[in-house]
């Protein structure tokens, strides 16, 4: 998959183990690095298994969450100009090959 970031600050945080450790601690930073590698290697989010990947219940339904550690999760969204959709209008995650990493947050689920 192709990854994008909304801000340079988030990009630098995700790409720097040192910065991620300083902000979130070793366990979260380690799993962040692993989950980003998993995303890069996958053809779609449906191939992901680690971190309990799941579609979020937000509207619009174009966001996905992946657990990290210590209650944190990685939140991403579809980053296609034309979002792949099923006949039902839902995102066809099997066809999503571009995602934007939105944030790292404390999970509420």
Image (tube, rainbow, N blue to C red):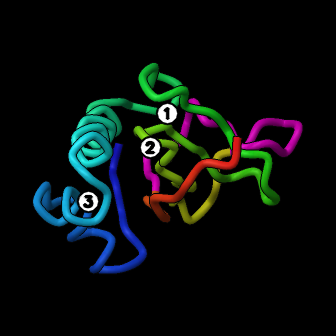
The residue identified by callout 2 is 97
Quadrant where the N terminus sits is: top left
Q: Is residue 24 visible?
A: yes
Q: Is residue 102 above or below residue 56?
A: below
Q: Residue at x 51, y 43 (%)?
A: 71
Picture residue at 64% right of the left edge, 46% below the top:
84
Left or right of residue 18, residue 67 in this image = right
Q: In front here: 12 or 96? A: 12
Q: Earlier in the sequence, mark 1 or mark 2?
A: 1
Instruction: Let me know if residue 93 is in the magenta part.
Output: yes
Tag 3 residue: 14
Find out whether the residues at labels 3 and 2 contact each other: C-beta distance under 8 Å.
Answer: no
Query: Picture quarter containing residue 81?
Result: bottom right
- Position of the C terminus by quadrant: top right
> What percent of the width, then of the height, locates residue 27?
27, 40
> What residue is rendered at 55% in x and 36% in y?
95
**Secondary element type, mark 3:** helix
Please say whether residue 7 is one of the residues in the magenta stretch: no
> Which x, y percent locates residue 72?
48, 48
- Find residue 45 and report its horizontal and vertical position in percent: 49, 33
Contact between marks 1 and 2 (CB within 8 A): the answer is no
Q: Name the residue located 42 percent from the left edge and 23 percent from the top edge.
A: 50
Q: Secondary structure at mark 2?
A: loop
Q: Which residues are magenta?
A: 85-99
């Amino acid at each position: 998959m192709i990854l994008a970031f909304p801000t340079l600050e988030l990009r630098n945080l995700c790409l720097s183990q040192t910065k991620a450790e300083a902000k979130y601690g070793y366990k979260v930073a380690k799993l962040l690095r692993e989950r980003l590698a998993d995303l890069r290697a996958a053809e779609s989010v449906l191939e992901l298994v680690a971190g309990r990947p799941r579609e979020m219940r937000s509207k619009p339904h174009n966001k996905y969450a992946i657990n990290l550690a210590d209650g944190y999760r990685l939140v991403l969204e579809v980053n296609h100009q034309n979002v792949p959709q099923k006949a039902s209008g839902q995102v066809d995650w099997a066809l999503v090959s571009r995602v934007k990493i939105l944030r790292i947050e404390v999970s509420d689920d």
